[in-house]
Image (cartoon, grey):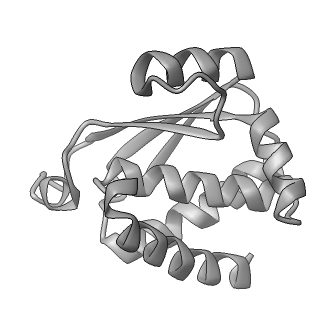
Amino acid sequence: MIILLNGYFYNHEKIKVSIAVNEFSKKFNISKNFYFSVHSINEDESKKINKKTFNKNFPTDVLSFPLYNNIDSINNLDKNMSEDMGDMFVCRNVIKKNAKIYNKDFSEELQYIVIHGLLHLIGYSHKKNDKLKIYEEELMKRIWNES
């Protein structure tokens, strides 16, 4: 799976995100030709998007906008083609705050946020919270043990 990063990301962050995305791709058997975009935005932008889209008037760490309804739809795509899976917007300041709360460094929290956002991109939502949390925990155990 290809990651298109928009905004600033340090090299060590790019490496950590790549590790997370590789684990995610293996778990869900997603083609290396498929891609998604991660946009780094500030708190004001995050708050505006969150308000407009979800009617929540606060900035958040990640907002995901999938192009497909679920993993089955994605797996039915031609794996030899270049397919866009959607967009993810991350807010560095919120991620920094959460990293302190959860006693992680920024790169580790960024990995978690990207995995969370990717799960949204393949159709898992907070309404299906059990699966979302199960996959998050499983993937993060693998990622943090390997990185």
Image quadrant of residue 38? Answer: top right
On screen, residue 133 above or below 16: below
Which residue shows up at 46% across the image and 68% down it?
Answer: 24
Image quadrant of residue 130? Answer: bottom left
Closer-to-camera residue (85/45): 45
Which residue shows up at 51% across the image and 72% down it?
Answer: 23
> What x and y, as percent, mark residue 136?
52, 71
Say which quadrant the C terminus sits in: bottom right
Which residue shows up at 19% across the image and 47% down it?
Answer: 69
> What x and y, as percent, mark residue 96?
84, 44
Closer-to-camera residue (127/146): 127
Q: Is residue 56 visible?
A: yes
Q: Is residue 42 visible?
A: no
> What x and y, as percent, mark residue 6?
61, 27
Which residue shows up at 36% across the image and 58% down it?
Answer: 32
Closer-to-camera residue (129/122): 129
Q: Is residue 11 left or right of residue 130?
A: right
On screen, residue 8 above or below 14: above
On screen, residue 90 above or below 114: above
> What x and y, as percent, mark residue 51?
51, 19
Say which quadrant the N terminus sits in: bottom left
Q: How many marks?
A: 0
